């Protein structure tokens, strides 16, 4: 398996994919990496939708500016909740109780902490907050894919309102499309140099 740095240098935002499906166990590992991402207070405010329907994919293709990568063998849509509510708190507490094999009532301190966050946050702030958490999960997904030599195309350049509508989402909004698969030898983006700021420019030592 590639080292982390080998994998990150190998990966690039892929444009053209081969028509080769990703083996199920590999795809499972990539999604698991996304699922296991940490998030503030463990709210995990993200849901991925795997697009299987060719009709829905075509509609997303139109709403996504006809980006080639939307035709990748696997297309995921990362969605986040529009707001956080007492129900969101309850879901997190129930998950914690299940994992710890505990009575949810014993987690009242945790519940109050989560609810306190909700009560003291302006509702219009939840969306950006959730996006920040969700992008940690997206980062984990992209790293896992790269280590497993699966190519990925994260895309924000699409009409989020339209894609949300196409998917019939009420409480969630689409924030990123992710194409996954294997690079086509015809994809000229793979020959582009890796463009990143030097380490001194992104790390300041004081
Ligand atoms: C969240 C996110 C959204 C992106 N959206 C698009 C997009 O809509 N269209 C596109 O061509 N590239 C998109 N990119 C790819 C970036 O342009 C690319 O990752 C960046 O230029 C660095 O190049 P590299 O990934 O090939 O190393 C996106 C990347 C990220 C992380």
Image (tube, rainbow, N blue to C red):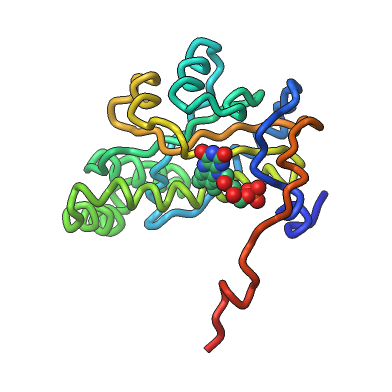
Give me the residue at 52% from left, 89% from top.
206
Relative to 83, does residue 139 appear above or below in the rendering? below
Q: Is residue 110 left or right of residue 135?
A: left
- Residue 132 lies, in percent from the top left, at 41, 53
Give me the residue at 81% from left, 32% from top.
185
Observer-nearest residue: 53 or 102?
53
Residue 36 appears in the figure: no
Give me the residue at 36% from left, 45% from top.
92
Task: For ligand 1, give the image quadrant.
Answer: top right
Observer-nearest residue: 56 or 145?
56
Observer-nearest residue: 162 or 172?
162
Relative to 55, does residue 35 appear above or below in the rendering? below
Q: Is residue 160 left or right of residue 51?
A: left
Q: Is residue 98 left or right of residue 202?
A: left
- Residue 2 lies, in percent from the top left, at 81, 52
Give me the residue at 30% from left, 45% from top.
127
| Residue at the bottom extreme of this rendering | 206
Relative to 143, does residue 66 appear above or below in the rendering? above
């Amino acid at each position: 398996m590639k080292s982390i740095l080998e994998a990150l240098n190998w990966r690039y935002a892929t444009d053209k994919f081969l028509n080769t499906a990703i083996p199920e166990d590999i795809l499972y590992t990539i999604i698991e990496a996304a699922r296991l991402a940490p998030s503030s207070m463990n709210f995990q405010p993200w849901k991925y939708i795997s697009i299987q329907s060719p009709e829905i994919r075509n509609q997303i293709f139109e709403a996504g500016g006809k980006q080639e990568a939307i035709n990748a063998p696997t297309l995921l849509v990362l969605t986040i909740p529009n707001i956080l509510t007492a129900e969101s708190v309850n879901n997190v507490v129930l998950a914690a109780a299940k994992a710890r094999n505990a009575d949810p009532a014993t987690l009242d301190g945790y519940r109050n902490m989560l609810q306190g966050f909700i009560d003291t946050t302006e509702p219009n702030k939840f969306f950006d907050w959730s996006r920040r958490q969700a992008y940690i999960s997206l980062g984990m997904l992209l790293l896992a894919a790269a280590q497993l030599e699966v190519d990925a195309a994260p895309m924000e350049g699409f009409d989020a309102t339209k894609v949300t509508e196409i998917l019939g989402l009420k409480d969630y909004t689409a924030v990123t499309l992710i194409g996954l698969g294997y690079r086509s030898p015809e994809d000229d983006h793979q020959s582009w140099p890796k463009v990143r700021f030097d380490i001194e420019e992104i790390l300041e030592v004081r």
